[in-house]
Amino acid sequence: MRTVSLLLILALTVPLLAAQPKAASSPSDDRIYNEVREKLALDTDVRGAAFDIEVKGGAVTLRGKVHTTKAKDKAEKIVKKVKGVVSVNNQLTLFTD
């Protein structure tokens, strides 16, 4: 009986313990959002563009307008380098004057 109780406790606690390091090592969407916003604002080619950034489960969606195709491509490249980003959906469009 004691062995069965011990096995039951182990069966219930091991999955919880295994899940903790994974949750702790994956960056939160809020942290990803903040880092993406900061890196885009600091880049000379991208800065000044109007962005809407959405992060869900590490998937980043960029919406808004940029001045050049180079800025659009560079924004995506910058976002891909942020730790925790799993994908980038680049919906940026060019300003039309």
Image: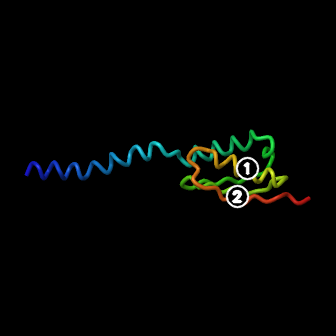
Q: What residue type is labelled 2?
A: Asn
Label 2 close to label 1 by CB (< 8 Å): yes
Residue 28 located left or right of residue 42: left
Residue 93 located left or right of residue 7: right
Q: What element carries label 2?
A: strand
Residue 45 located left or right of residue 35: right
Q: Position of residue 88 (x, y in %)?
A: 64, 56
Question: Mark 2 = which residue?
Answer: 90
Q: Earlier in the sequence, mark 2 or mark 1?
A: 1
Q: Residue at x 80, y 40 (%)?
A: 44
Q: In which quarter of the image is residue 48?
A: top right
Q: Position of residue 18 (x, y in %)?
A: 35, 47
Q: Quadrant of residue 57?
A: bottom right
Q: Residue at x 12, y 53 (%)?
A: 4
Q: Residue at x 79, y 44 (%)?
A: 47
Q: Residues within 10 Å of mark 2 (few under 14, many from 20)?
A: some
Quadrant location of the C terminus in the rendered image:
bottom right
Q: Is mark 1 on a helix, strand or loop?
A: helix
Q: Residues within 10 Å of mark 1 (few under 14, many from 20)?
A: many
Q: Which residue is drawn at 14% across and 51% down?
A: 5
Return the residue found at the far top: 42
Identify which residue, 12 or 77, lies in the foreground.
77
Question: Mark 1 = which residue?
Answer: 75
Q: From mark 2 to mark 1, how far is it between C-alphas? A: 8 Å
Identify which residue, 79 or 62, lies in the foreground.
79
Q: Where is residue 23 in the image (x, y as percent from the top left)?
A: 44, 46
Return the residue found at the far right: 97
